[in-house]
Image (cartoon, rainbow, N blue to C red):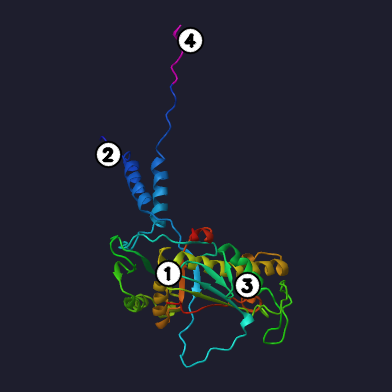
């Protein structure tokens, strides 16, 4: 009789031996693609305007960032400018660009781009002052950082 | 003699360690790609150089005031949604000849003698106020650049049967330089 006794068939367990391989693969992918945030924002994170005529910024190592936005402290009005990791004045921009240039090879300098990450609410006057400083020291390539979207939404 | 085997290291917890690291990188990673409108600032000029004299009909004047209102050609109050079309119409007018005396054979505009002569001569002048909001300023810039993209794309499709972005660098260069050069001039903002 025992010959016909039904054998209790359990579900065969799925082998998890290759799980570490899969996880490692993912891990390496993220390790390679990750970019650590280099600077901490001292101003309120700028709400970037939207635009559709945008270009990708190639070669991040050649880009220096200027942040423009409101102070975190709500009682302080006006636009604040952040270079590297501190809030600065307009007049500091020149030395900021010079120090950026010093970290690059001579032949890369014409390709250095300044990316302006400014808040939608910022005044054009502030941006113009920045541009004037950049013109003074011949840092002519700029990029207005924007999100992808419809430009008409900026006006609302 | 009994052969002693080296005890194997238990690799069962490797997955846990890898997961921990994976989650750390997942959280810290920022995948955002920086995008934006690229512009080239004009070089600093000698203040003694007199600006070239331009015909008024070749200049498309866009003013943005501190209340984010747009005034075009000094008399038309315009919404941002209409700016692109108006700019295209101005650039593509082709009512006259360029500096070499050649007519614009590819223009599809109205050939209005009161508007721009030639895309090579057509200048967009943008003036804003110091109090204009940056969002509006970017919108206006975007629409002006878009007008040029529309025209370049149209020409590329007509001539090469391809979108402008799909053309070779050589072909793009020709269009950028000789067909629809982008001439956007920014004046000092009003105080």
Mark toward the start of the polypeptide (4 vs 1): 4
Whether tag 3 and tag 1 are in contact, CB under 8 A, the answer is no
Measure how far apart labels 3 and 1 are at the Cα level.
Answer: 25 Å
The image's mark for residue A8 is none
Question: What mark, if any, has residue B172 been given in the picture?
Answer: 3
Of residue A134 and residue B66, the one placed in the foreground of this image is: B66
Whether labels 4 and 3 belong to a single chain: the reply is no
Asked if the stretch drawn in magenta spans residue B171, the answer is no
Secondary structure beneath disc 4?
helix
Residue linked to disc 4: A4
Q: Which residues are magenta?
A: A1-9
Residue B69: image location, x then y, percent: 51, 67
Q: Nearer the viewer, mark 3 or mark 1?
A: 1
Tell which of A36 and B163 is nearer to you.
B163
Q: On screen, B170 above or below B4? A: below
Q: Against A110, is B148 above or below?
A: above
Q: Quadrant of residue B44?
A: bottom left
Local SS, label 1: strand
Q: Nearer the viewer, mark 2 or mark 1?
A: 1
The answer to whether dots 2 and 4 both sit on one chain is: no
Query: How crowded is the residue under tag 4: few (<14 C-alpha within 10 Å), some, or many (20+)?
Result: few
Instruction: Kindly report which numbered mark, 4 or 1, lies closer to the viewer in this rendering.
Output: 1
Label 2: few (<14), some (14–19) or many (≥20) C-alpha neighbours in 10 Å: few
Q: Nearer the viewer, residue A156 or B108?
A: A156
Looking at the rendering, in which quadrant would you find the C terminus of chain B?
bottom left
Horizontally, residue B147 falls left or right of residue A127, namely right
């Amino acid at each position: 009789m025992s010959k016909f006794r039904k054998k209790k068939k359990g579900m065969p367990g799925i082998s998890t031996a290759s799980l570490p391989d899969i996880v490692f693969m993912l891990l390496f992918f993220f390790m390679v693609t990750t970019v650590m945030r280099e600077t901490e924002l001292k101003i309120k994170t700028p709400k970037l305007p939207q635009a559709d005529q945008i270009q990708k910024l190639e070669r991040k190592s050649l880009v220096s960032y200027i942040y423009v936005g409101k102070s975190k402290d709500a009682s302080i009005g006006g636009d604040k400018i952040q270079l590297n990791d501190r809030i600065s004045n307009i007049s500091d921009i020149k030395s900021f660009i010079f120090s950026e240039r010093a970290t690059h090879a001579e032949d890369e300098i014409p390709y250095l781009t300044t990316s302006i990450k400014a808040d939608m609410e910022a005044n054009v006057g502030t941006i113009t002052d920045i541009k004037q400083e950049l013109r003074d020291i011949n840092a002519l390539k700029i990029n207005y950082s924007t999100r992808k979207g419809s430009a008409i939404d900026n006006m609302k | 003699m009994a052969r002693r085997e080296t005890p194997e290291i238990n690799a069962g917890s490797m997955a846990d360690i890898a997961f921990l690291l994976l989650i750390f990188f997942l959280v810290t990673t920022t995948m955002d790609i920086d995008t934006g409108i690229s512009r080239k600032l004009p070089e600093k000029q000698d203040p003694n150089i007199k600006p070239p004299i331009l015909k008024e009909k070749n200049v498309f004047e866009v003013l943005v005031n501190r209340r984010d209102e747009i005034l075009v050609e000094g008399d038309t109050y315009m919404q941002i949604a209409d700016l692109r079309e108006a700019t295209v119409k101005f650039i593509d007018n082709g009512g006259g000849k360029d500096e070499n005396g050649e007519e614009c054979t590819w223009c599809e505009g109205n050939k209005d003698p009161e508007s721009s002569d030639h895309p090579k001569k057509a200048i967009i002048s943008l003036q804003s106020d110091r109090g204009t909001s940056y969002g509006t300023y970017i919108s206006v810039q975007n629409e002006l650049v878009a007008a040029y993209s529309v025209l370049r794309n149209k020409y590329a499709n007509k001539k090469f049967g391809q979108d402008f972005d799909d053309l070779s660098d050589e072909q793009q260069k020709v269009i950028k330089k000789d067909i629809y050069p982008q001439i956007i001039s920014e004046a000092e903002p009003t105080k």
